Amino acid sequence: MAVVGFAYWAFPYLKYRVKEVRCLELLDKEYFNVFSLKGDKPKVNVYNDPKECLEDADAVFITGMTVPNGTLKDILNYCKNARFKVLYGPSCSFYPKYLFELGVDCILAMKIPSDYETKLNTIETRGYYPFHRPNTKMLIIMKM
């Protein structure tokens, strides 16, 4: 399994379900160390080369930030042989039909309230607040 973006929050859930987690990150891989507090050998490997990380992955989770930063089409091209491609995060909640046409199989999006309190708390918590707001809705949009 490959993850585009350092989705550290998902790694503990994946540890016993996959053979290996490959993480594609734009920052130099020397900045990342993955440790297990139980002493197990971590099954998370960080890559900087998209081809090396993605070309033979069975499933790929792709950060929605690839939409605004313009790298989504390239990422999808590198993982075109993957059986399942998931786009996740608040940046991917727009135009699901277009994303499916590009090759995405599933979208894990968020619908975040736009009231003043949410905006202010999002700024104060550097983007962390909406994930714990009761009115934030998690959406699973599947290609059918």
Image (cartoon, helix red, strand yellow):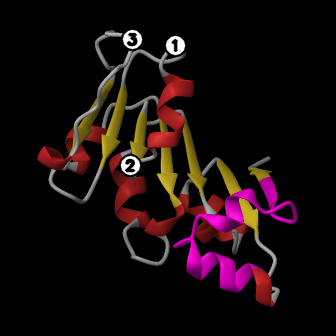
Q: Residue at x 43, y 65 (%)?
A: 72
Q: Is residue 105 left or right of residue 137?
A: left
Residue type of the residue flagged with mark 2: Phe
Eyeballing the image, is 117 above or below 128? below
Q: Position of residue 40 (x, y in %)?
A: 33, 9
In the rendered view, would you say 127 is above or below 56?
Answer: below
Between 4 and 101, the residue placed more toward the observer is 4
Dot 3 amino acid type: Lys
Q: Residue at x 37, y 56 (%)?
A: 75
Q: Is residue 110 above or below residue 106?
A: below
> Nearest the camera: 21 or 37?
37
Q: Look at the image and say whether residue 100 sits in the magenta stretch.
A: no
Q: Residue lying at the far bottom in this picture: please name it.
A: 116
Horizontal and vertical percent position of residue 119: 69, 84
Q: Which residue is mark 3?
A: 38
In this rendering, is residue 134 above or below 69?
A: above
**CB atoms of marks 1 and 2 within 8 Å:** no
3D distance between C-alphas at marks 2 and 3: 21 Å
Q: CA distance from mark 3 to mark 1?
A: 13 Å
Where residue 11 appears, x then y in whole percent?
A: 47, 31
Q: Residue at x 73, y 57 (%)?
A: 132
Q: Residues within 10 Å of mark 1 (few under 14, many from 20)?
A: few
Residue placed furthest toward the right: 135
Residue at x 47%, y 19% (from the top left corner)? 15
Residue 54 in view (yes/no): no
Residue 36 picture quarter? top left
Q: Position of residue 41 (x, y in %)?
A: 28, 12
> What residue sits right under mark 1 in the picture?
16
The range drawn in magenta is: 118-139
Which of discs 3 and 1 lies nearer the camera? The answer is 3
Disc ID at residue 6: 2
Q: Secondary structure at mark 3?
A: loop
